Amino acid sequence: MSAAPASLTYTHNGNRMAYTRQGSGQPILFLHNGGASKEIWTEQVNALSDRFEIICLDHLGFGESDMPSSGYTVMHYVDALSAFIDHLAVGRINVVGNCMGSAMTLLLAQRRPELFKALVLINPLTANTARRGVIGWVLPFTTRLPRLSMWVARRIRVSAPLSRFVIAAQYGPRGWRRGLIKPLPGAVTAGATWTTRGRLASMAELFADLTDLAAIDQMWPGSDFPPMAVVWGNANLGLSPRAGRELNSTLRPDRTEFLAHCGHLPMMESPAAVTAIIDEFVSNPPTRQAGALHSVG
């Protein structure tokens, strides 16, 4: 394992985005899901930073990044990611994303495929995968009453003990009890993102309009799209793995994985398996074959 990561910031439209850089070699950018932080990738950073340059970003509204009062639409996140990758100036980059991190990567890759070398997309957030998971229970509130949703979200603060449960509840059925008793590496820091009052406003605005997320459900990447692997926690409750299988039929990824017993945070629940997928795919990405889909698991 290499030295401790350097903590850095990048300013986009006046807002600071926190990130870390560690190691050397091919760059891999890691993007977390909503309601978490860059620390969900702790195990992957430890395992891969001796051979890759690992960059972990806190999205605006999360972790150590700024929490502006607004600006959390899907396309705001896509624009910020595009500018951040340009700022890194590392050439074609590998990206590993979870949930909203996967969604913004897909939309940016459609716009600017030349930025990317390979993508590993975990639990991609789309309108369909959200509607058919537990997240779908709150979507009628956020989409039909966006102002009220934002008003409520700006006033919610989750206590520190409850934040541990919020993270553990995202694990699969075999992991959540263990996660409550002994937090997995990175879980305490990732959960702390919920303890700041108003933190949920980012998610309320993100889900106020599903138009851009719905566009991912209709996406048909061509041969110019970067090679991609799609990974699902097969016991994910927040987003629907069944809808994820349908999404794969149109995304046509070069590699698919469904990890048994894992939920929304497989990088924490089954770190060795997720790390191996990332390592294998990034080290030897296939030539993109539009229409081909290699299914595993």
Image (cartoon, grey):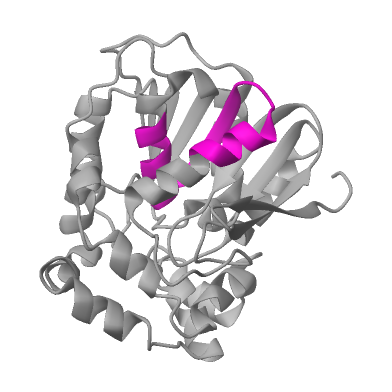
Position in image of residue 202 (x %, y %):
39, 67
- Left or right: residue 106 versus residue 127 is right
Position in image of residue 167 (x %, y %):
48, 72
Q: Can residue 219 be seen? A: yes
Position in image of residue 190 (x %, y %):
57, 68
Q: Exactly how many numbered labels are in the figure?
A: 0
Above or below, 111 relative to 131: above
Q: Is residue 100 a member of the stretch shown in magenta?
A: yes
Above or below, 70 relative to 241: below
Q: Nearer the viewer, residue 61 or 237?
A: 61
Position in image of residue 227 (x %, y %):
45, 19
Above or below, 271 relative to 69: above
Q: Which residue shows up at 38% across the image and 20% down it?
A: 254
Q: Farthest right residue?
A: 3
Span shown in magenta? 82-108
Q: Nearer the viewer, residue 208 or 163?
A: 208
- Which quadrant of the view contains residue 144? bottom left
Q: Farthest front residue?
A: 14
Q: Which residue shows up at 49% across the image and 66% down it?
A: 61
Q: Which residue shows up at 56% across the image and 62% down it?
A: 37
Which quadrant would the N terminus be assigned to in this image? top right
- Which quadrant of the view contains residue 105? top left
Q: Is residue 166 a member of the stretch shown in magenta?
A: no
Q: Can residue 232 be seen? A: no
Which quadrant would the C terminus be assigned to in this image? top left
